[in-house]
Image (cartoon, rainbow, N blue to C red):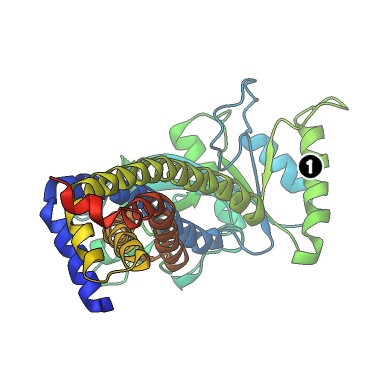
């Protein structure tokens, strides 16, 4: 029997018991689907996360009350807030740029009756180091100045989404934009920066934090982030050590006690995120392994039943010259075909659903070729392991006894 004929015979055998074959395929599909879906989604998010880390400059790090990225739950001990007064004291003590970032409000911006489509414009308080410390580029106009901050001026930098919606045919510079009851003079427009997981960096208004503290109150409010720009990558660790020392003094941390604040860099955030994605990948792989084990048992079961039902067919084939190796190969081929069909469907569905993450957040798609190839190798091994005993049993059938079987 040639290879083409063998494949045709294997397909005929599977089609003869459609429901049983479909139920066996389902376990294989679920197993591969769980693995590929989780890996694809993780690849999509991880790739975009690496790009979005450019929110911080290469030699920039942040100081915050709690970790910027955390998947382990809240700290059982509440830490004291980081106040604006502490930010100012830190800025006085170090020689490199220090910029706070605090979210004060969110809503719709408007100008002369024209409003932004979405109410997702964030009002952010910072200082004159906004461009350097938050890796933003100026498209037109000027940035915030030290005078804007010290005099608490009602001025703002706007991002492209706001500029395009409120000023489609004119320059926004010098115009007064309103948002949530406040009115702010546009002094500059920033370059586009994109979004991360639905959070747009291009729907923001940056203003002097001193003005917003007066307008919104809360001088003792917690500052969500302090960005510190080191002189160079080579001096990053030195700058971090200096900031840690000053912050411990400013926040009155007793000697020997752990810091009651966090220092975060691109590397630490990447490490935290990779821990989460590793857990997600292992979880998907674990679920997939259980499903594949169940599918392997199902394949063994269907092949044993098939051997029993086809005893007479096996006897006839042996009587006309089929060897034990022919019978063994035929049943192994059926098991392999069953696994490959299930594995292929699982991979296709897994990639499709996993890239649903990319579609939902409007980011680049990904296909985990390594995992896809590895999954097909795994299903092939499962076919051999769980199909070998039924195939051996079929090859061992006595042709004389099998021809008497009813």
Residue 166 position (above or below residue 75): below
Give the quarter of the image for residue 81.
Answer: top right
Q: Residue at x 51, y 48 (%)?
A: 277
At 23% from the left edge and 46% from the top edge, which residue is drawn?
308
Q: Within 10 Å of the Cα at label 1, are there few (<14), some (14-19), or many (20+) other Cα atoms?
A: some
Quarter of the view holding residue 43: bottom left
Please tell me which residue lies in front, 5 or 98. Answer: 5
Residue 219 image-quadrant placement: top right
Left or right: where 380 falls relative to 2: right
Q: Nearer the viewer, residue 374 or 197?
A: 374
User: Which residue does the numbered mark 1 point to in the structure image?
Assistant: 244
Which quadrant is home to the N terminus? bottom left
Of 231 and 321, which appears nearest the observer? 321
What percent of the width, then of the height, locates residue 356?
28, 55
Q: Quadrant of the C terminus?
A: top left
Q: Secondary structure at mark 1?
A: helix
Q: Is residue 88 left or right of residue 363?
A: right
Report x, y in % for residue 199.
38, 51
Q: Position of residue 160 (x, y in %)?
A: 35, 65
The residue closer to the viewer here, 356 or 123, is 356
**Vertical placement of 66 versus 308: above or below?**
above
Whether residue 190 appears in this view of the structure is: no
Q: Residue 236: where, in percent of width, then height? A: 77, 58
**Residue at 11 percent of width and 55 percent of height:** 16
Residue 251 seen? yes
Total count of labels: 1
Does residue 242 appear left or right of residue 371 in this picture?
A: right
Work out which residue is located at the far front of the displayed protein and give it. 400
Q: Residue furthest top?
A: 77
* Residue lying at the far right of the rendered structure: 255
Q: Is residue 194 above or below residue 6?
A: above
């Amino acid at each position: 029997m040639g290879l083409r004929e063998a494949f045709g015979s294997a397909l005929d055998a599977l089609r003869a018991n459609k429901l049983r074959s479909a139920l066996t395929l389902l376990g294989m599909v679920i197993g591969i689907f769980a693995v590929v879906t989780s890996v694809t989604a993780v690849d999509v998010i991880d790739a975009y996360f690496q790009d979005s880390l450019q929110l911080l400059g290469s030699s920039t790090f942040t100081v915050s009350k709690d970790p910027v990225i955390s998947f382990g739950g809240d700290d059982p001990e509440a830490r004291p807030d980081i106040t604006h007064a502490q930010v100012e004291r830190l800025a006085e003590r170090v020689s490199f740029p220090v910029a706070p970032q605090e979210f004060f409000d969110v809503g719709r911006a408007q100008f002369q009756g024209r409003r932004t489509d979405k109410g997702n414009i964030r009002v952010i308080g910072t200082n004159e180091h906004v461009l350097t410390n938050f890796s933003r580029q100026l498209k037109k106009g000027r940035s915030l100045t030290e005078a804007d901050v010290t005099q608490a001026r009602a001025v703002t930098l706007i991002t492209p989404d706001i500029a395009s919606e409120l000023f489609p045919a004119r320059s926004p510079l010098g115009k007064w934009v309103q948002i949530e009851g406040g009115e702010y003079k546009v002094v500059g427009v920033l370059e586009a920066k994109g979004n991360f997981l639905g959070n747009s960096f291009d729907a923001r208004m940056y203003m002097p934090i001193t003005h917003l503290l007066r307008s919104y109150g809360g001088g003792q409010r917690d500052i969500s982030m302090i960005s510190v720009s080191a002189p160079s990558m080579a001096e990053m660790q030195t700058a971090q050590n200096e900031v840690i020392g000053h912050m411990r003094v400013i926040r009155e941390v007793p000697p020997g006690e752990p810091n009651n604040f966090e220092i975060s860099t691109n590397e630490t955030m990447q490490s935290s995120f990779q821990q989460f994605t590793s857990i997600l990948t292992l979880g998907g792989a674990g679920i997939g392994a259980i499903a594949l084990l169940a599918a392997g048992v199902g394949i063994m079961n269907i092949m044993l039943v098939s051997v029993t039902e086809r005893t007479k067919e096996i006897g006839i084939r042996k009587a006309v010259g089929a060897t034990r190796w022919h019978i063994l190969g035929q049943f192994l081929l059926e098991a392999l075909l069953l696994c490959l069909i299930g594995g292929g469907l699982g991979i296709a569905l897994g990639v499709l659903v996993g890239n649903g993450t990319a579609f939902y957040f409007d980011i680049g798609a990904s296909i985990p070729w390594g995992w896809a190839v590895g999954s097909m190798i795994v299903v092939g091994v499962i076919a051999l392991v769980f199909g070998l005993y039924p195939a051996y049993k079929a090859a061992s059938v006595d042709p004389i006894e099998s021809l008497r079987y009813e």
